[in-house]
Amino acid sequence: MGSRFKNAIALSLLPQIILVKWWGSYPDSIEKYYSNGFYPIVSKFFRYLFGWVPFSVGDVLYTLLVLLALGYLVREREKIIKHPLSFVRSIIMVLSVAYFTFHMMWGLNYYRLPISQKFNLTATYSKEDLISVVKQLTKKTNQVQFEITSDTAKAVQVPYTKKQIFEKTLEGFDALGKRFPFLKYDVPSLKKSVYSLQLTYMGYGGYLNPFTNEAQVNGKLPFFRLPVVCGHEIGHQLGYSAENETNFIGYLATVGQDDIYFKYAAYAYALSYCLSELRGTDEDQFNEQYATLHQGVKKNYEEMNNFWMAYENPMEPLFKSAFDIFLKSNNQTKGIMSYNSVVSLYVNYYKVHPL
């Protein structure tokens, strides 16, 4: 590869960034030509290509790239020391290619129209609206917990294998796609991440590989949380990048099933976000509502908390901070806190479609 060509690729990074930010200021155009035009074709192609493979191709590719990079650093260390500017150019060139590939294959979805417009939902709600939904979700969560266990003090244990949870998640999207055609999902590519342990230490439940379009979940998660996380990652595959929106999609795909365990997973998931929001606005009301929860539901929440606490480590805040910066640089102004913005979608959805 000639020096001029390398320079051109490296120098293209800045105009790429400018072009993405410029086009991103026209979400209607992104929605029409990318999110509902080019992206579905690319996504389906890679799901056909890799979806049938029983392991995460993306994780394997990441591993190979890291090994190749380390090998290059060792092999070319003397050359790197002698020609540091050339090495910097190589790094920028790699970043330029990665930036282009990321946005072409998935990243431009960060700039599409919000999903609330698809559902005709408003963006604001009152504290009274929030309390109303908390009460509704509490009633449903308690009801299903007792229906499963016949004991208000007993935690719910999901009896399925990971494979069965994956299969039932796909059934949930079949039903969801019939209700909302823009959420139709076929040619599945849903897998357990090879790096589930590493994801746990980083504090993540899963991720979408934007280069292979595989929806990957953390296989170590407690099973009562896994169904909604599977739905969340498929939501990313469908072209919704915002974390609050995929939280909402995952919830809808899970709660819409006839399966009682999936309903419980969904209700408990949505309730946890709404309770957290209520706690931040009115702690007295939070304490009042939390006191009405069955002890078994509280035990499931403790199970999740204990799971994450068991893997807490000094590096986790750094990973979360890096992800926060990544989200903010990709049109998610609230960063990692955007997950919590799903509460607005829950509340306004249930104002239109009461539980």
Image: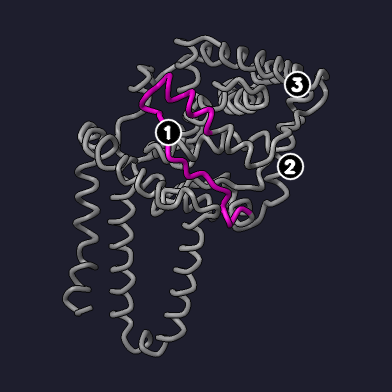
Query: The C terminus is located in which quarter?
Result: top right
Residue 295 at x, y = what percent? 79, 23
Nearer-the-camera pick, 44 or 21: 44
Going from N to C along the chain, the mark reached first, 2 or 3, is: 3
Rendering quarter of residue 81: bottom left
For disc 1, the neighbor class at 10 Å (few under 14, some 14 to 19, many from 20) is many
Residue 148, numbered circle = 3
Residues under labels 1 and 2: Cα distance?
A: 34 Å
Q: Element type at marker 1? A: loop
Q: Disc 1 marks which amino acid?
A: Tyr
For mark 1, what is the residue?
Answer: 185
Q: Is residue 294 visible?
A: yes
For disc 2, the neighbor class at 10 Å (few under 14, some 14 to 19, many from 20) is few
Rendering quarter of residue 39: top left
Residue 353, numbered circle = none
Residues under labels 1 and 3: Cα distance?
A: 29 Å
Going from N to C along the chain, the mark reached first, 1 or 2, is: 1
Q: Is residue 280 visible?
A: no
Q: Nearer the viewer, mark 1 or mark 2?
A: 1
* In the depicted structure, whether residue 199 falls above or below residue 260: below
Q: Which residues are magenta?
A: 170-196
Nearer-the-camera pick, 44 or 149: 44
Residue 14 at x, y = what percent? 22, 59
Residue 306, numbered circle = 2
